[in-house]
Amino acid sequence: MSSVSRLSVNVNAVAMLRNRRDLPWPSVTGLAAIAMEAGAKGVTVHPRPDERHIRKTDVFDLAELIEDRFPNKELCLEGYPSADFMQLVEEARPEQVLFVPDDPSQSTSDHGWDFTKDTGELETAIAAAREWTVTVSLFCDPDPTTPEQAARLGAERIEIYTGPYGACYDDPARAQKELEKIALTAEAAKDCGLGVNAGHDLTVENIPALIERTPFIREMSIGHGFTADALIFGFAESVRRFRKSMGEL
């Protein structure tokens, strides 16, 4: 058991629900505070250009919340390293940034970086974020060849895309194959001196096997699965349920 949590709660879905009405509830900062009070490591948000869920104002509100009330917690900003996003990172100064190769029209992050393409813009963004003392993570597919390339660009961590593993909820044999891909990628990252995060479609049911196979994962960013669980059990109890699935309670 560990007193330090791996769980970063993604609150995009809270913002999406709020944005259905021109009203201030459900409160993004209010539910983020509940999650952190219950033991989450921090919160993750992905502010998209169209502000379909998280707004720029939410980012600053969350940064202020953590600075004022939760100085030992972490805000992670996820996004494509456009000029607008980099300006937001510079102004908000989150503890961590996750660069993803998303097109603005994508509904969610569903693939990692293709490091065979031009990475000059990405390398520039990494250098800038590190200059601002922001920890840099790159979104990677479960492919053991990617960590070395991420390290070469100057990243400090990778976040392994666990969507294919999460999609195997009804196919244990395929889940085991996907789990092995994640594990090999995580081990390659560790060998390169990179920290390892994981995220996408993780649940209280599929996390234990992932932790058993890759116990050195530092952080898991969980949004959809967490929100679905919280609709039944409530935010605070879902934090405890997910932390228990990670072997922390």
Image (spheres, rainbow, N blue to C red):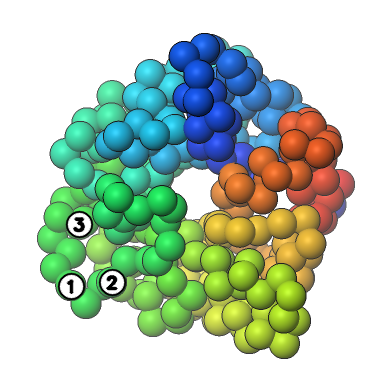
Give neighbour class at mark 2: few <14, some 14-19, many 20+ (Cα, 10 Å). some
Tag 2's secondary structure?
loop
Task: Indicate whether 150 appears above or below 60.
Answer: below
Any part of residue 218 in sight: no
Q: CA distance from mark 1 to mark 2?
A: 6 Å
For the point 35% across and 31% down, which residue is it? 51
Under mark 2, the amino acid is: Asp
Closest to the camera, between mark 3 and mark 1, is: 1
> Label 3 is placed on what type of residue?
Glu
Quadrant housing residue 237: top right
Q: Is residue 132 left or right of residue 172?
A: left
Q: Decide: marks 1, 2 in contact (CB < 8 A)?
A: yes
Reply above or below: 27 against 135.
Answer: above
Which residue is under mark 3?
123
Q: Position of residue 159 (x, y in %)?
A: 48, 59
Compare marks 3 and 1 and give the one earlier in the sequence: 1
Q: Residues within 10 Å of mark 1 (few under 14, many from 20)?
A: few
Residue at image position (38%, 66%) is: 112
Q: Name the residue type under label 1.
A: Lys
Q: Is residue 21 above or below residue 218?
A: above
The residue singled out by tag 2 in the image is 114
Q: Report x, y in % for residue 47.
A: 37, 35
- Residue occupying the point 44% across, 33% down: 53
Q: What is the x, y in percent for residue 100?
A: 35, 55
Q: For mark 1, what is the residue?
A: 117
Crowd tier of the residue under label 3, counting other residues whose Cα lies within 10 Å: few below 14, some 14–19, many 20 or above: some
- Measured in 3D between alpha carbons, the distance from the residue under mark 3 to the one under mark 2, in whole angstroms, is 13 Å
Q: Do residues under tags 3 and 1 come within 8 Å of each other at their CB atoms?
A: no
